[in-house]
Image: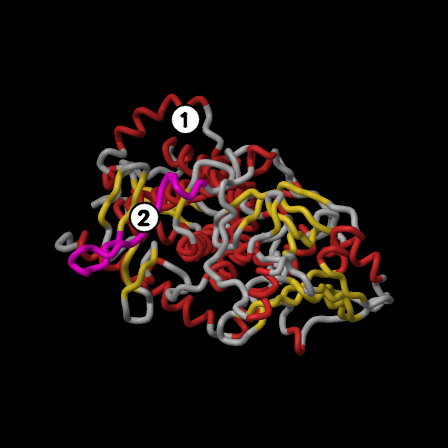
């Protein structure tokens, strides 16, 4: 027998504004990624330049009719070509059939192909994300990695090799701080600013805006790559949340209260 | 407890994605949701439409080898074909509505009466691609000065000669303020040659500060009106299909 009150400590980890903006931003990011893929479907090619070099895309999604009469979906990156039938290039159209479309209906908002509706969702939630991120950023300034965090980083990296053995501490660990800081102050700004660089009116106001990304079409690459980076973060984030005490983690982001056990491990 | 966790999570991920797509799709049909989703357009217009900044102009060497166009056919009428073959003899541009001096101009009058303006600007299609081209023609502002804008006029409507193949005519509109932008051009030349049919012959509006769909092709009638709505719908063919009237984003 041991005394529960000394074995478990409750800490108030996330204040209300953080919890609110966390969930709003999560919703916004999801809608933005999916409506962004809807928009991408209208012209599924990326060019490393200002104007489009239609014959030389960096990346392109497409579909071809194979000699056997079947449709083949593909993705090309440079001279590399991958067969992606059923998912990318040729897949579900959201109306029960198959169609030539870069991203399948289950990845886009709306499910059916409609650029105008996709843009409405995207631009609305872009505002939601920017407002949430601005509020969140004020709090996230505290995540600025200190010299001590950087010193402890190798140790933190080692402990993360086995996700479910990561010690649960009252304070965020150095790797968490660094990751959240990078997402809020590096990746998210790149995604937002490269998105703004796609706007012809923004570009008229600020000629340097598309130029800093290598041109308007290049800004699309940054925007796309930033989305991939955010999705990668999301995947790892969900993995860590799930394996390091799902209930405890979810509770802390809902009520603010996080339980730390003596010895640091969550069994 | 651990049994089947990974396949289970995969299933949850895939079905929740498709669930999200389905929920959002059905929400899109709801008129209240639509009104909410449309709301940022006014904010964007207020923020970005406040000034009259100039779109970046490019060098001759930046011009794209081919000025891409969407797969719509040029007007199919016999009249249009005759004009194409006949060098636009007999074609006139009409300017009327809320103007002091309604007028018609043939192509020669447009070239002789007004100062020829050129711009090498980037055309950003709503689909995502961009092309750079040199456009030459008459400033919409110069046309407006010649016709005289009446005080009540709020919008400049550009009527096109082509339809979508199902009988709906293309049209576009700008606010008077947007129409007076120093780069709003009614172009008769693309890359120093008469505008080709697929790019909007004989006259194409060019508004480089907004997306390509605002740059109406095959314009033969400019009408000044007090407000949009009614016969003029939401102010354009694409606007009537839920695209933003303010296409600055």
Is residue A248 rendered to the left or right of residue B4? right
B182 w.r.t. B74: above or below = above
Q: Which residue is mark 1?
A: A149
Dot 2: element: helix
Q: Extreme left residue here? A: B3
Instruction: State which chain disc 1 sits on.
Output: A
A62 w.r.t. A185: above or below = below
Q: Position of residue B1 (x, y in %)?
A: 15, 55
Dot 1: element: helix
Q: Extreme bottom residue here? A: B230
**Viewer-proximal residue, A160 or B56?**
B56
Badge 2: residue crowd in 10 Å (few <14, some 14–19, many ≥20): few
Among the 4 quarters of the image, the one containing residue B243: bottom right
Task: Magenta stretch: give its range.
Answer: A53-73
The quarter of the image holding the N terminus of chain A is top left
A36 w.r.t. B236: above or below = above
Residue A58 is one of the magenta-drawn residues:
yes
Q: Which mark is residue A46?
A: none
Residue at point 32%, 44% (across, down) = A8
Q: Position of residue A49 (x, y in %)?
A: 47, 36
Cα gap from disc 2 to disc 1, whole angstroms: 23 Å
Among the 4 quarters of the image, the one containing residue B58: top right
Residue at point 39%, 41% (across, down) = A55
Q: Position of residue A103 (x, y in %)?
A: 34, 55
Q: Which residue is mark 2?
A: A238
């Amino acid at each position: 027998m041991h005394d529960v009150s000394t074995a478990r400590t409750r800490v108030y980890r996330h204040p209300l504004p953080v919890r609110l903006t966390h969930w709003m931003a999560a919703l916004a990011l999801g809608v933005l990624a999916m409506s962004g893929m809807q928009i991408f479907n209208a012209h599924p090619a990326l060019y490393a330049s200002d104007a489009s070099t239609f014959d030389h895309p960096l990346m392109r999604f497409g579909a071809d009719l194979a000699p056997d009469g079947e449709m083949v979906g593909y993705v090309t990156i440079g001279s590399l070509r991958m067969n992606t039938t059923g998912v990318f290039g040729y897949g579900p159209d959201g109306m029960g059939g198959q169609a030539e479309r870069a991203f399948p209906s289950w990845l886009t908002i709306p499910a059916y192909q409609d650029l105008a509706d996709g843009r409405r969702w995207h631009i609305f939630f872009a505002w939601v994300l920017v407002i949430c991120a601005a509020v969140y950023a004020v709090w996230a300034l505290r995540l600025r990695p200190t010299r001590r965090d950087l010193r402890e980083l190798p140790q933190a990296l080692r402990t993360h090799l086995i996700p479910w053995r990561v010690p649960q501490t009252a304070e965020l660990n150095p790797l968490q701080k660094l990751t959240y800081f990078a997402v809020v102050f590096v990746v998210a700004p790149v995604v937002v600013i490269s998105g703004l660089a796609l706007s012809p009116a923004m570009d008229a106001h600020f000629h340097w805006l598309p130029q800093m990304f290598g041109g308007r079409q290049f800004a699309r690459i940054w925007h796309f790559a930033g989305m991939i980076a955010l999705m990668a973060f999301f995947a790892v984030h969900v993995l860590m949340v799930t394996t390091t005490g799902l209930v405890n983690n979810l509770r802390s982001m809902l009520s603010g209260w996080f339980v730390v056990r003596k010895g640091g491990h969550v069994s | 407890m651990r049994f089947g966790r990974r396949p289970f999570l995969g299933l949850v991920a895939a079905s929740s994605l498709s669930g999200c797509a389905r929920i959002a799709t059905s929400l899109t049909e709801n008129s209240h949701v639509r009104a909410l989703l449309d709301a940022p357009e006014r904010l964007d217009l207020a923020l970005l439409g406040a000034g009259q900044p100039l779109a970046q102009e490019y060098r001759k060497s930046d011009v794209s080898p081919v000025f891409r166009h969407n797969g719509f056919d040029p007007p199919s009428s016999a009249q249009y074909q005759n004009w194409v073959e006949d060098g636009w003899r007999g074609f006139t541009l009409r300017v009327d509505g809320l103007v002091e001096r309604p007028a018609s101009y043939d192509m020669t009058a447009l070239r002789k009466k007004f100062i020829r303006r050129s711009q090498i600007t980037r055309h950003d299609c709503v689909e995502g691609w961009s092309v750079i081209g040199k456009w030459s023609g008459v400033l919409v502002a110069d046309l407006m000065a010649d016709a005289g804008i009446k005080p009540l006029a709020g919008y400049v409507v550009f009527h096109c000669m082509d339809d979508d193949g199902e009988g709906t005519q293309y049209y576009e509109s700008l606010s008077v303020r947007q129409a007076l932008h120093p780069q709003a051009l009614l172009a008769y030349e693309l890359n120093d040659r008469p505008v080709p049919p697929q790019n909007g012959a004989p006259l194409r509006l060019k508004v480089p500060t907004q997306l390509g769909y605002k740059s109406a092709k095959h314009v033969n009638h400019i009408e000044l009106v007090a407000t949009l709505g009614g016969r003029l719908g939401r102010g354009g063919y694409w606007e009537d299909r839920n695209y933003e009237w303010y296409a600055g984003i």
